[in-house]
Amino acid sequence: MLGVRLDTELEERLAAVARTQGRSKSDIAREAVRRYVDLHDEAYRREARRQSTRASARLSVADGVFWQDGAAWR
């Protein structure tokens, strides 16, 4: 359960949209929050994948250098 305080203007605008669409204010707010979370959660996942890919590429290059240098120690 979540309670949200809205300023008067936004509350009135939300109520007007709800009346126009024949929906409840809660239904509209729930949809808005779901879309926001989906958008930002996906952006977070994309960034995590990007960073993981970059780190993996760096490790692969570093590992190759390590093993090449290691061959010189023999």
Image (cartoon, rainbow, N blue to C red):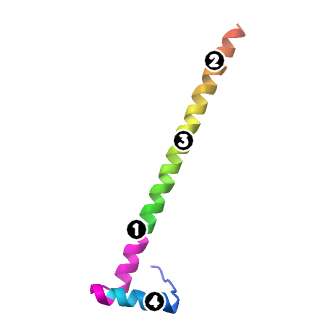
Q: Residues within 10 Å of mark 4 (few under 14, many from 20)?
A: few
Category of crowding for the residue at label 3, using alpha-carbon neighbours closer than 10 angstroms: few (below 14), some (14–19), many (at least 20): few
Report the magenta residues as a range: 19-34
Q: Determine which of the numbered discs, if any, sits on residue 64 in the image.
A: none
The percent coordinates of residue 63 (x first, y second) are: 61, 24
Q: Amino acid at mark 3?
A: Ser
Quadrant the C terminus occupies = top right
- The circle on residue 11 is 4
**Which residue is located at x 64 percent, y 26 percent?**
62
Q: Identify the residue under disc 1.
A: 35
Residue found farthest to the top: 74
Reading the image, the residue beneath label 3 is: 52
Lower position in the chain sequence, tag 1 or tag 3? 1
Q: Nearer the viewer, mark 3 or mark 4?
A: 4
Residue at left offset 40%, top offset 79%: 29
Rounded to the nearest angstrom, the CA distance separating label 2 from label 1 is 48 Å
Circle 4: residue type: Glu
Q: How far, Cα to Cα, is label 1 from label 3?
A: 26 Å
Q: Residue at x 38, y 90 (%)?
A: 15
Residue type at numbered disc 2: Trp
CA separation, marks 1 and 4? 19 Å
Quadrant of the rendered image containing residue 58: top right
